Each structure stands twice: as C-alpha cells, then as structure tokens.
Image (cartoon, helix red, strand yellow):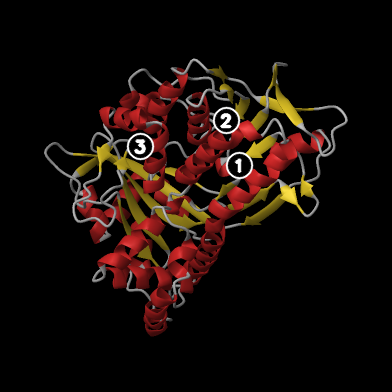
C-alpha cells in the first residue's frame, strides 16, 4: 500500500483518487475551491461554484476512451452518471458498437464523480486548501519530493505527489523552490476564443442528430453542439482574438442569431430555449511539459497528470480521456515508486510520452493551420483549409463507403488507437493522399458567409 497526495480535484484528480483508493492505496486530495457539489448532481450546473475551473460551463465531450477506463476501474460511476440523467448515445450502426458514449454536462459529471470519491474511506478530501509549495527530502539531488505544504501551514507527506492542478499549475515555481532544474516546456500559442451557451430541448422535442456532437467548420471560425443530460446541450462558436467582432458573440441576441443563421445549428436552436448567458473562454494554447530532460528526472516523488502534463485545444475533447488513461496507469504502477523513485519518474514519463504525448504534434499543426485560415478570412482574403483539415476531410469522405475505415477512424477519434496505427498504414495513406491532392487549395463554401456573419453581429 502506498500513500498518494493529489493536488486538484478536477476530473483527472478525482479519477486518480478513485482508482488508487479502489486498489487499496491511501489518498489525500487537495482542492482550492471550498464548495462541495449539491447532493442532487443534476442541479450542479445551476448551483455549483467552481471558481478554479473556467471551463466548467463550457461544452464538453467525453470520448470513448474515458468510458472504457471507467468500465474497467469504476463501472458503478457509469451507472450513476446515467441515473443522474446522462444520455447513452445510440450506437446503432455505429463503428464502435461496444463503446458506451455518454452525453452529460461537465459539472453534472464532476458532481457524480466527486460523490463517488467522497464515499471512499481511503480518500481524505481537503476542501478550500491552496497548495503553497512542495516538501523535499533534505540533501536529495535531484530533489525527492515527499509532500506538500498549504497556504494555511498544513503539511502532508506521502510516497508520491500527483499534480493534477490543471493547465495553470504552479509546479514550476514549487519545484524551483526545492532546488529542481526547470522542467521541459513546449508551448504553441493560439488566438482561439470559444463562446458557449447552453440550451434545453422544448417539451416533446428530441436531439436532431444521433451522435454526441454536431459541427460546422467555417473559414473564419466554427460552430459545434455538445449533447448533455436532461435534454440540455451546449452550443459553442469558435472565434479569435484578432476578429474585431468577437465581443459581439458574448451578447445573447447576437450569439443566438448567428447560430440560427447556420442551417445545421438552426436545427438545434429551433427546438430549444437558452438556459444561461454566453460565456467566453480564451487562452486556448497547446502545452506539453516534461519532468525528464537530458540529465534525467528534474525531481522524483512528483508527477504531472492531465492538463498539468499536456493540454491541447478542447475542441478535440481529449483532455478527460487522456487524464483517465494516465490515472489508470499511475494506479496500476504506483507500488513501484517507493523502492525506486528516480526509476519510477523515468518509467512514468516514458509511458506518458508513448501514450499521451503522441496526440500533441497533430493538435499543434491543426491549430496553427486553422488560426492562419481564420486570419486570412477575417482580412477578406481567400482562406482554403490547411493540410491537417484536408486529411480529416478526406478520412470522413472515404469512411462513408468503407465500414472498416470508418471503424478505424472512429477508434482514432475516440483515442482508442494512436495516430500512427492509422496514418502509418501505407494502404490508408495511398487512398488519403490522392483525395487531399485533389482538394488542395479549395476555399470552403461557408454555411454562413463572412459578410452575412458581420451583418448579424453588427445589426
């Protein structure tokens, strides 16, 4: 049995605590926000305050990998989510008939998971606790982290400190304070801003599409819906910091009018009513951190999990699934840590590099390409889709008449297979490359033209 100390009670930190406790380990979980979720999870969206989670009321998709991990580690949580109103997506004629896909709002999902963790006798949740720094073993080089200290002066020591505090982790400062070398940090900034509003179906209406989400790509942005629980769904519009009209989208009437003007989105707005005001989320950068450099681990006894380790554009909905995968791996291997802290640091980093970080390069390339297209469109120039989008379009088009390719494409999108398994197959690429070549440089026929968009938001 080991003792884990976790920083952050978001979905990654909660899942890690749950998986560890159910394998017999002791867990102390520190969360900066002090409010507990309501006893009734479906009311969490309206009433639960999560100041430390700016994405809490944005749209969320929970990919197949997240449900697959829960199915092996905590199947009862899947059942509780359904009891709380999560929709089980109909898999009829779907490429992934064995995967249970859920549609549920983030705060409802998190409330269910928090309740499951709180019920574990091996987990102690410290609410309203701000971590102020790490505790290292005196004289260790590189530093061996043996605990943390809160701003209130509480010390908590354990075998492993797990940083699940998210993309804005202060881990670099904490490590520097105990004498560690700087960690490796790769960042690719993007200008993206998401503006999201939630709606609920009117009485007697049903979702217009069978899948979890519906998307429309525009040369200057994009629109997406994410199904939720209890007939609720999120509508998100992608804009950018260099779009002079981005601010207008935070006005309820303008946001609604833009969505109504996009035919695929109008199919949703026409059968629903809004339940909150539009909310903006910016600073959507891609970032990859590593605790191992050319000299080895910068520290031991400390690992990064979830968004603290890697975060990418949330439009791909990968964050929760990858955090769960990391949490499962950590729970399965943590007993190796006390005997060989440095070796464990290297091994966990190697696993993360192979199974988590492989998704980073593609996200960066796709975002750089999309940002460039949006900038051209906002300037009134021709704005063809970039090469990454062209490959995705090719896969969707080819998969329509190829069930095997559709299954493999779905497995990649739900993170059940790594990118190399599909794109490293010469037979697949021999079909994709001619399609891309034949559609290179084509300017998309926007479902809502840039001119019409500007007319709506300036009306």
Q: Position of residue 341 (x, y in %)?
A: 72, 36
Of the image marks 2 and 3, the number of the one nearer the N terminus? 2
Q: Of the numbered discs in the image, which one, if any, rests on residue 105?
A: 3
The crowd level at tag 3 (other Cα within 10 Å; few <14, some 14-19, many 20+) is many
Instruction: Answer with left or right where residue 428 lies relative to residue 399.
Output: right
Q: Is residue 327 above or below residue 459?
A: above
Of the image marks 1 and 3, the number of the one nearer the N terminus? 3
Which image quadrant for residue 410? Answer: bottom left
* SS at badge 2: loop
Residue 84 visible in this rendered orientation of the protein: yes
Q: Position of residue 282 (x, y in %)?
A: 52, 48
Quarter of the N terminus within the rendering: top right
Q: Position of residue 84 (x, y in %)?
A: 29, 28
The crowd level at tag 2 (other Cα within 10 Å; few <14, some 14-19, many 20+) is many
Of the image marks 2 and 1, the number of the one nearer the N terminus? 2
Q: Is residue 81 above or below residue 279?
A: above
Please report contact status of discs 2 and 3: CB closer than 8 Å, yes or no.
no
Pick the front one: 130 or 162? 162
Q: CA distance from mark 2 to mark 1?
A: 10 Å
Q: Residue placed at 71% from the left, 32% from the top?
A: 339
Q: Of the numbered discs in the image, which one, if any, rests on residue 90?
A: none
Q: Residue placed at 41% from the left, 46% from the top?
A: 65
Quarter of the C terminus within the rendering: bottom left
Label tally: 3
Q: Of the numbered discs in the image, which one, if any, rests on residue 308?
A: 1
Pick the front one: 427 or 387? 427
Pointer 2: what residue?
8
Which image quadrant for residue 172? Answer: top right
Q: Position of residue 390 (x, y in %)?
A: 41, 73
Please report contact status of discs 2 and 1: CB closer than 8 Å, yes or no.
yes
Residue 278 visible in this rendered orientation of the protein: no
The crowd level at tag 1 (other Cα within 10 Å; few <14, some 14-19, many 20+) is many
């Amino acid at each position: 049995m080991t003792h884990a100390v976790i920083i952050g009670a978001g979905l990654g930190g909660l899942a890690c605590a749950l998986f560890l406790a159910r394998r017999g380990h002791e867990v102390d979980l520190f969360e900066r926000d002090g409010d507990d979720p309501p006893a009734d999870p479906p009311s969490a969206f309206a009433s639960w305050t999560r100041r430390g989670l700016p994405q809490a009321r944005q749209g969320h998709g929970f990919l197949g990998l997240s449900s697959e991990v829960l199915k092996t580690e905590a199947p009862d949580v899947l059942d509780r989510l359904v009891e709380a109103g999560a929709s089980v997506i109909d898999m009829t004629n779907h490429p992934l008939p064995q995967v249970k896909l859920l549609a549920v709002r983030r705060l409802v999902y998190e409330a269910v998971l928090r309740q499951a963790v709180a019920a574990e006798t091996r987990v102690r949740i410290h609410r309203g606790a701000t971590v102020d720094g790490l505790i290292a073993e005196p004289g260790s080089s590189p530093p061996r982290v043996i605990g943390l200290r809160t701003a209130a002066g509480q010390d908590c020591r354990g075998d492993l400190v797990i940083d699940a505090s998210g993309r804005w982790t202060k881990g670099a400062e904490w490590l520097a304070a105990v004498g560690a070398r700087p960690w490796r940090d790769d960042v690719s900034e993007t200008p993206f801003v998401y503006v999201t509003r939630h709606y609920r179906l009117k009485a007697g209406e049903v979702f217009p599409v069978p899948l979890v989400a519906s998307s429309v790509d525009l040369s200057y942005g994009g629109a997406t819906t994410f199904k939720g629980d209890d007939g609720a769904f999120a509508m998100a519009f992608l804009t950018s910091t260099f779009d002079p009209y981005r601010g207008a989208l935070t006005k309820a009437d303008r946001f609604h009018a833009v969505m109504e003007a996009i035919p695929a989105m109008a199919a949703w707005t026409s059968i629903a009513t809004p339940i909150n005001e539009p909310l903006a989320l910016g600073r959507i950068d891609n970032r990859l951190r590593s605790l191992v450099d050319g000299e080895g681990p910068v520290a031991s006894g400390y690992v990064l999990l979830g968004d603290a380790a890697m975060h990418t554009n949330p439009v791909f909905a990968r964050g929760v699934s990858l955090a769960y995968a990391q949490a499962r791996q950590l729970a399965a291997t943590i007993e190796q840590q006390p005997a060989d802290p440095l070796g464990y640091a290297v091994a966990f980093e190697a696993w993360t590099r192979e199974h988590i970080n492989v998704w980073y390069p593609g996200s960066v390339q796709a975002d750089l390409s999309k940002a460039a297209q949006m900038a051209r469109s906002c300037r009134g120039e021709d704005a063809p889709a970039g090469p990454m989008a062209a490959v995705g379009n090719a896969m969707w088009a080819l998969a329509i008449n190829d069930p095997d390719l559709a299954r493999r494409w779905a497995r990649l999108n739900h993170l059940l297979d790594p990118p190399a398994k599909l794109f490293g197959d010469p037979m697949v690429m021999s079909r994709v490359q001619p399609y891309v070549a034949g559609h290179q440089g084509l300017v998309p026929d926007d479902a809502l033209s840039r001119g019409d968009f500007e007319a709506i938001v300036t009306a």
